[in-house]
Image (cartoon, rainbow, N blue to C red):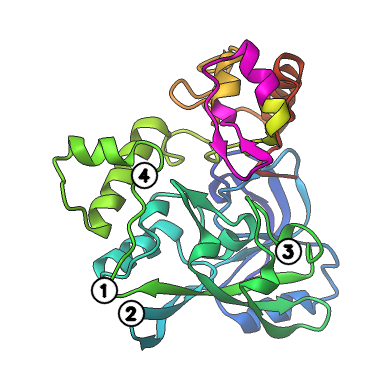
């Protein structure tokens, strides 16, 4: 393990923002991680994984630790389930493909989500009707107060919509080292009713889909709507879909009769943030070398050379405009530093 100085973080964030780390180290073992966190020569530390859910707006005056723990291990099988432990630095989509190759079901709807396994529980990532909490069994974490390893159950993580204990009461307390998933082995439950999966399967002429077919459909949909971070800087969906009251929804529906929505409960409705942003006139809009993606309004783009501050200001403009038009507050899904 080597500690470097004045290192660009452009290769370590999917927005491709060129800010610098005062100090930088990439670690591959838990022992290296513990060693860095017990090193008092670097009092300020900043953890980075796949860099897919962050917007860096300034240089990082700290020791930036790149968490590069790798490995997949089958812990046990029982009846129709398999328990798989995956290290935090494992690429998420590569792991999804591995499960499909082994005919393990549960992650197919979350294919092609950027980032690493270790950051997935923080956001409770999800796509096309499936969330991480649906397949999450437990995770191993490093408690930064005493540098001891602990195990947190699904219930202990207090998952919500794009939310978890790691974003709230336990923020800054733990580092996720690995995640254990509970996946199906044979009797897979397919979720094909959300979004355009059904129509995509029809276009692929698939009548009796497998988990691999569902994954292929999701990949095709995402590729048609979302830019590849390796080609154009972005962090996927920048904003959360807002949840509003049924009363506010009925008021909005008077002025916007075609307002798309998803019923969450008897009192709550989820509104697609992308629709709101498009109706506000931002879809496909460019500002010099950054802007809003032309096919998916939820995605903010760095076409090359934009600063994190420029993209942050654009996100604030979108938020203010949405509130002015619809009286709805939309929150950033990405973490802003």
* First along the sequence among labels 3 and 1: 3
* First along the sequence among labels 2 and 1: 2
Q: Nearer the viewer, mark 4 or mark 1?
A: 4
- Point out residue 190 in the picture as x, y percentages from the top left corner: 32, 57
Instruction: Using a 10 Å C-alpha cutoff, classify the residue at mark 3 as few (fewer than 14 neighbours), some (14 to 19) or many (20 or more).
Output: some
**Closer-to-camera residue (179/300):** 179
The residue that label 4 is drawn on is 193
* First along the sequence among labels 4 and 2: 2
- Point out residue 136 in the picture as x, y percentages from the top left corner: 52, 69
Picture quadrant where residue 49 is located: bottom right
Specify start and end residues of the magenta stretch as a single range: 250-274
The residue that label 1 is drawn on is 186
Instruction: Using a 10 Å C-alpha cutoff, classify the residue at mark 2 as few (fewer than 14 neighbours), some (14 to 19) or many (20 or more).
Output: few
Q: Are marks 4 and 2 in contact (CB under 8 Å)?
A: no
* First along the sequence among labels 4 and 3: 3
- Distance in Å between CA atoms under marks 2 and 1: 6 Å
Q: Which mark is residue 160?
A: none
Direction from residue 243 to residue 170 in the image, left or right: right
* First along the sequence among labels 4 and 1: 1
- Distance in Å between CA atoms under marks 4 and 2: 23 Å
Q: Nearer the viewer, mark 3 or mark 1?
A: 1
Locate the N terminus and report the quarter of the image it occupies.
Answer: bottom right
Q: Residue at x 36, y 86 (%)?
A: 77
Q: Which mark is residue 165?
A: 3
When the figure is inspected, residue 185 is found, relative to residue 226, above or below; the finding is: below
Q: Is residue 73 visible?
A: yes
Q: Are marks 3 and 1 in contact (CB under 8 Å)?
A: no
């Amino acid at each position: 393990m080597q500690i470097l100085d004045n290192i660009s973080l452009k290769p370590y964030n999917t927005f491709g923002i060129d800010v610098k780390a005062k100090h930088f180290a990439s670690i591959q073992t838990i022992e290296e991680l513990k060693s860095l966190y017990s090193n008092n020569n670097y009092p300020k530390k900043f953890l980075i994984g796949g860099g897919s859910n962050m917007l860096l707006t300034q240089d990082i005056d700290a020791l930036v630790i790149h968490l590069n723990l790798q490995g997949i291990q089958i812990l046990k099988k029982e009846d129709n389930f398999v328990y798989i432990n995956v290290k935090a630095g494992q690429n998420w989509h590569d792991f999804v493909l591995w499960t499909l190759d082994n005919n393990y079901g549960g992650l197919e709807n979350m294919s092609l989500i950027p980032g690493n396994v270790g950051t997935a529980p923080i956001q409770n990532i999800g796509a096309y009707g499936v969330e991480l909490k649906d397949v999450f069994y437990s995770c191993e974490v490093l408690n930064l107060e005493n540098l001891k390893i602990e195990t947190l159950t699904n219930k202990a993580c207090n998952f919500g919509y794009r939310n978890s204990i790691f974003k709230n009461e336990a923020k800054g307390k733990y580092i996720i080292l690995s995640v254990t998933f509970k996946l199906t082995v044979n009797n897979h439950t397919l979720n094909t009713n959300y979004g355009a999966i059904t129509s995509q399967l029809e276009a692929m002429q698939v009548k009796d889909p497998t988990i691999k077919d569902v994954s292929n459909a999701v990949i095709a949909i995402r590729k048609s709507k979302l830019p590849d971070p390796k080609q154009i800087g972005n962090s996927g969906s920048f904003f959360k879909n807002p949840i509003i009251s049924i009363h506010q929804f009925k008021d909005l529906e008077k002025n916007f009769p075609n307002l798309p929505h998803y019923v969450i409960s008897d009192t709550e409705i989820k509104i697609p943030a992308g629709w709101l942003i498009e109706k506000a006139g931002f879809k496909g809009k460019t500002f010099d070398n950054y802007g809003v993606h032309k096919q998916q309004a939820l995605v903010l783009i760095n076409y090359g050379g934009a600063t994190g501050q420029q993209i942050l200001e654009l996100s604030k403009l979108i938020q203010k405009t949405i509130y002015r038009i619809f009286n709805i507050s939309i929150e950033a899904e990405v973490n802003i530093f």
